[in-house]
Image: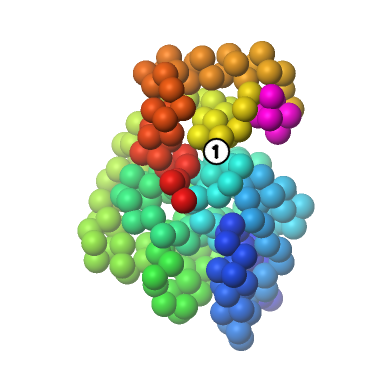
Amino acid sequence: MPVRVLLVENKVMVRQGIRLLLERGSGIEVVGEAGDGHMAVKLALTHLPDIVVTEISLPGLNGFEATRQIRAKKPNVNVVVLSEQANMRFVARMFQVGALAYLLKEESDRELVKAIREVQAGRRYIGPKLVNSFVGDCVQNIVNGVEPSSLTAREREVLQLVTEGKKSKQIAHLLGVSTKTVGSHRQNLMEKTGRYSVAELTKYAVIEGLTSLE
């Protein structure tokens, strides 16, 4: 049986290119595509793919949170990260929230297929370009040692939306909560991070990998 894959990438042309290479006689079937984190979670729960291939920088809900939610709700759905981010902290955090493989977009087509095969067999995989830059050697040592953010999952969602320029009313609508609740989350964010402006919160979010400057 083919390996059933859900593709998550916000750039349409990149996503289409990945789909073409995966379906080129590799025994892999792409069962769905998503351009943002919320849709990724929704499709993962409805399509139940074997593997989700995802980028980290996603609008609405970043790859960290999307992976965490997918793995929490459907632990049999595995995650392969295909990203431009070679930051060791990002790599470790993705493994921490449940991903089983991480490779860079500059890797060859064969490496992505190999990563999917390894994960389908229940093994962890790190792309050779990461290993060559010594990130791979460090990941295993810090996966369990990275201190989890003191922010709650909902606070991280609010933080990402704030840094994307959303107003409290828009955030409340997107998350299905009251503006008062959003205000409380924003206050908690400022107190926990020690950042009291959108610019400072954005810088913090970039460092934490919750958003990007793209």
Residue 191 drawn at (x, y percent): 43, 14
> Disc 1 on helix, strand or loop?
loop
Rendering coords of residue 125 (x, y %): 41, 63
The residue at the point 45 percent across, 46 percent down is 212
Q: In the image, what residue occupies the spot 67% across and 73% down?
A: 29
Identity of the residue furthest to the bottom in this view: 25
Would residue 158 appear left or right of 40 to someone viewing this image? left
Colouring method of the image: rainbow
Q: Please provide the residue range marked out in magenta.
A: 169-174
Residue at point 23%, 58% (across, down): 134
Viewer-proximal residue among 27 and 21? 21
Tell me residue 25's x, y (percent).
Answer: 61, 86
Evaluate whether residue 49 shows in this view.
yes
As shown in the figure, which amino acid type bears the numbered disc 1? Glu
The quadrant holding residue 197 is top left
Frontmost residue, 42 versus 144: 42
Q: Is residue 162 above or below residue 213?
A: above
Q: How many marks?
A: 1
Q: Is residue 133 magenta?
A: no
Horizontally, residue 166 falls left or right of residue 93, namely: right
Q: Is residue 165 left or right of residue 134?
A: right
| Front in this rendered view, residue 116 or 14 | 14
Which quarter of the picture shows residue 84? bottom left
Horizontal and vertical percent for residue 43? 72, 53
10 Å crowding of disc 1: few (<14), some (14-19), many (20+): some
Quarter of the image with the N terminus is bottom right
Q: Residue at x 47, y 42 (%)?
A: 211
Camera-side residue of 85 and 180:
180
Residue beneath disc 1: 164
Which image quarter: residue 17?
Answer: bottom right
Q: Is residue 52 visible?
A: no
Magenta residues, dominant SS class: helix
